[in-house]
Amino acid sequence: MKATLINKIAAFIMVGFLLFILIKRNIIDENKIESNFKFSEAVIYKIFYPVDGGPDAEFQYTVNKKIYKNRVTFNPINQKITVGNKFLLKYYPPNPNISRILLDKPLP
């Protein structure tokens, strides 16, 4: 009986933690980018199809001579993305890891 209570508490804490991560990433970080941002150029260097969905594109960008990497899920019907494509990217200057690639803004 005691183990069941501990499992329920652990599950509750885990769900709370996951909700916090989702809220932080999708709301708080997004608001940071909208209130204070700079632009960079993102280059697609890998496209893959993960089991849980996709396709995903991995991209990299440079801020102050440091390379950052991230990934984005895209719709292959609406967005024709290939390795080597370049896109405009918004990033949060105090923490360039917080970024958003603008797939509707390809660069030549």
Image (spheres, rainbow, N blue to C red):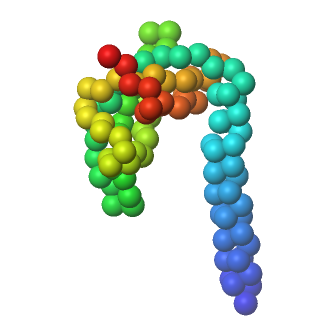
Residue 68 visible in the picture: no
Residue 33 visible in the picture: yes
- Residue at 53% x, 32% y is 100
Horizontal side of 21 relative to 71 (left or right) equals right
The image quadrant of residue 25 is: top right
Towards the viewer: 79 or 38: 79
Q: In this picture, is 37 found above or below 15?
A: above
Q: Residue furthest bottom?
A: 1
Towards the viewer: 40 or 7: 40
Horizontal side of 3 relative to 61 (left or right) equals right
The image quadrant of residue 43 is: top left
Across and down, in percent, residue 32 comes to: 69, 29
Horizontal side of 96 relative to 11 (left or right) equals left
Horizontal side of 88 relative to 30 (left or right) equals left
- Residue at 68% x, 83% y is 3
Q: Residue furthest front?
A: 78
Across and down, in percent, residue 94 comes to: 65, 19
Towards the viewer: 69 or 105: 105
Q: In this picture, is 30 found above or below 74?
A: above
Across and down, in percent, residue 37 comes to: 63, 20
Q: What count of labels does the image hold?
A: 0
- Residue at 30% x, 39% y is 80
